Amino acid sequence: MQAQRADRGGEERPVPGLFHDLDELNHAISGSELELIQLEPGDLAVRASSVDIDGLSVDRGSINRNLRVRGGLDTERYSLGIFHPGARARLNGIAVDPSAVLFMTPGLELDGHLCESYGWTSLVIPATWIETISLAARDPGFLSLRAGCRGLRPDARKLYDLFLATEVLVASRCRAASCQEGETELCLNVRDALGAVLSEFDTSDRRVVSGTVSQYRLARRAERCIRERGSENVSVDELCAELQVSRRYLEYAFRNAFGTSPSRYSRLLRLHHVRRRLRRLGAATTVTTEALDHGFTHLGWFSMQYRALFGESPRSTLNRQASPGIS
């Protein structure tokens, strides 16, 4: 697990599991390859920790800023998301909150946005566990044979039991004198609680709100257009003409799916790309070059937007990479 630094009484000390950088956070989440975009200005402080036992990974954490999340999950294991009190998110077109769980099959693309003060527990589950749970369900194979992302609002007690089982498992691993036999038992408790929650899938409501699905698909198409344009400053009117929809409908669908407007998302995406270039190339590039290459023609406005989002000027980012020996 990577660590960041926190200022405590004038002295900088490593704080395990505390991240101030989204690229570093990506590699702390089990089995995933994610792109994270900060949607609101301000200092980022994300806590994330991971426990791996017997093929199961339990990730826990919280964020303090709205994030856009996009990318692939574990290609061999299933994923299940549990949402902490106060959490709000929309992932793969599904609105989730503390009463919901999100079940995702191997290799699925996670796509959506996470709201501020979001807390999560995610379970990355061995395929053998799912096969066993599926055999015990009313509809054998209902989990292992259906690809995609599914939302479920299980019985509150069953969900609490699963959350508690993961909490005890994580606490046990964090203790210095953990016992392997005890961890095996705790792992079985998680497996039993997971089976109780997932067994409700075969009795869940199968109604689909077609309007919500079509809006999510439209938002995905719009984002694909934005990414295909690369460094261009794409206008909402151009997107509407290309997708043949009204501006009001497009903006509503996009905000509902990804937590921000298409125009603002295009700007944020390009700002993140500039930051990655400055950090990667260092002295081999300039702020002006990268800003212009990514469609920012007003350098003063670009610098203001960059500082508001990342808490430092683009020149500071570049100088730090050009002079790695200077803290």
Image (cartoon, rainbow, N blue to C red):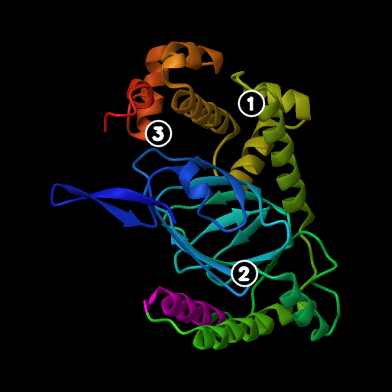
In the image, residue 123 lies at what x, y percent? 59, 68
First to last magenta residue range? 162-176
Q: In the shown orientation, is residue 99 left or right of residue 204? A: left
Q: Which residue is labeled 2 in the image?
A: 101
Q: How crowded is mark 1: few (under 14 residues within 10 Å), some or many (20 or more)?
A: many
* Amino acid type, mark 1: Val
Q: Which residue is labeled 3 in the image?
A: 309
> Element type at marker 1?
helix
* Amino acid type, mark 2: Val
Mark 3 and mark 1 in contact (Cβ < 8 Å)?
Answer: no
Q: In the shown orientation, is residue 107 left or right of residue 159? A: right
In the image, residue 283 lies at what x, y percent? 41, 16
Instruction: State whether residue 327 is above or below residue 78.
Output: above
Q: Which residue is rendered at x = 63% and y = 26% of the image?
A: 236
* Amino acid type, mark 3: Leu
Q: In which quarter of the image is the C terminus?
A: top left
Disc number for residue 236: 1
